[in-house]
Amino acid sequence: MESPIEVNDDGVKLKPEIMEPEKFYHCIFKEKVILVFKDHQEFLNCFEIEESDIVEKIKSSKDEDIHSVLESYIEKEKLKKQ
């Protein structure tokens, strides 16, 4: 099965036509996590995470655990801002 995200030395290539709506896709490029998803209106949303602790956690996580890594980070940041 073809992947909707390809990474090579030149950068990240996205194939939104094969992405499922509302599903997160990710890759690691130059020590950054690239998060991508296509919303229900077919808009492509991309996020870049540079924080080394999150990048390392995601690198060492299984695909199904990445959502929980991100959730715990968001929760931690909310607590700091209160």
Image (cartoon, rainbow, N blue to C red):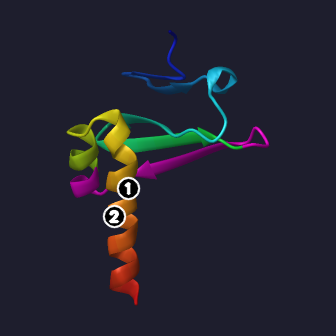
Q: What stretch is highlighted in magenta?
A: 40-54
Provide the residue designation for mark 1. 70
Foreground residue, 73 or 15? 73
Query: In this figure, what is the number of numbered marks?
Result: 2
Q: Where is residue 60 in the image (x, y as percent from the top left)?
A: 20, 39
* Residue 5 in view in this figure: yes
Q: Are marks 1 and 2 in contact (CB under 8 Å)?
A: yes
Residue appearing at x 63%, y 42% in the figure: 22
Spatial CA span between label 1 and label 2: 5 Å
* Residue 50 in view in this figure: no
Q: Where is residue 24 in the image (x, y as percent from the top left)?
A: 52, 40
Q: How crowded is mark 2: few (under 14 residues within 10 Å), some or many (20 or more)?
A: few
User: Please, what is the three-letter code of the amino acid marked with disc 2?
Assistant: Tyr
**Is 45 covered by the magenta stretch?**
yes
Residue 80 disc label: none
Question: Compared with residue 62, is residue 8 higher up or lower down, i.e. above or below?
Answer: above
Q: What element carries label 2?
A: helix
Provide the residue designation for mark 2. 73
Q: Where is residue 77 in the image (x, y as percent from the top left)?
A: 36, 74
**Is 41 covered by the magenta stretch?**
yes
Image position of 14 (left or right of 42): left
Residue appearing at x 59%, y 40% in the figure: 37
User: Please, what is the three-letter code of the amino acid marked with disc 1?
Assistant: Leu
Residue appearing at x 56%, y 45% in the figure: 46
